[in-house]
Image (cartoon, rainbow, N blue to C red):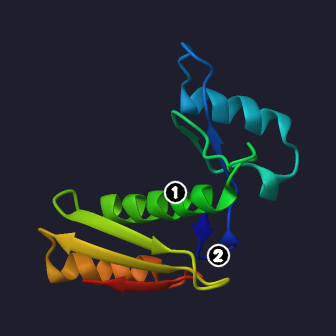
Amino acid sequence: MPDAYAGEVPVIYVEPRSGAVLDSAEVLAYITERIHEPPAKPRHVFVIPEIPRTGVGKIFKPTLREMAMRQKIIAALASSSAEARAEVAVDMSRGKRPAIAIRLSNAADDVKAKLRAELQDLLVDISIE
C-alpha cells in the first residue's frame, strides 16, 4: 500500500476457504505475532472473496496493488469527510509511477484540499476533481 513516509507498506489480502469466516483483526494479530521484523509487519489485512489470478493460476499482483491504492484513498477520504463520495480510477500502465484520478461529489473545497495534502507525498500522480 502506498505510504508517504516509507514509500509503501506491506498489507495482506486473504481469500477464505469455502464456508469459512475470517475476522481481519484476528488475522492481523496472528500474523504480526509471528513476524519479528517491524518493517515487514503488515499494516492491514483485507479479506476478499477471491484472490485475482493470471490465466495459469499465479497471483496477479498488479490488481492487488491497485486494490491497496484504492483502500488508501478510501481511508484518506474517510478521515477528511464522512459526506463526500469518491470515484477512484487507477492507471497502472504508465510504468513505475501509477496515476490515480479521484472524482469527488458532495465534497467541499476544504475536503479536497485536505485530501490533496494527505496524499501529496505518495509516489503516485494524483488528480482530484
Left or right of 33, for residue 120: left
Q: Is residue 111 above or below residue 81?
A: below
Residue designated by label 1: 67
Q: Residue furthest right?
A: 36
Residue beneath the point at 41% across and 58% down:
75
Residue 120: percent from left, percent from top: 47, 85
Residue 77: percent from left, percent from top: 33, 64
Query: Callout 2: helix, strand or loop?
Result: loop
Residue beneath the point at 16% across and 72% down:
107
Left or right of 80, for residue 12: right
Quadrant in which the C terminus appears? bottom left
Q: Is residue 35 above or below residue 62?
A: above
Residue 12: percent from left, percent from top: 66, 45
Residue designated by label 2: 5
Q: Which mark is residue 119?
A: none
Q: Amino acid at mark 1?
A: Met
* Residue 101, quarter of the rendered image: bottom left
Please rate how many residues cluster around mark 2, counting C-alpha atoms within 10 Å: few if below 14, some from 14 to 19, many from 20: few
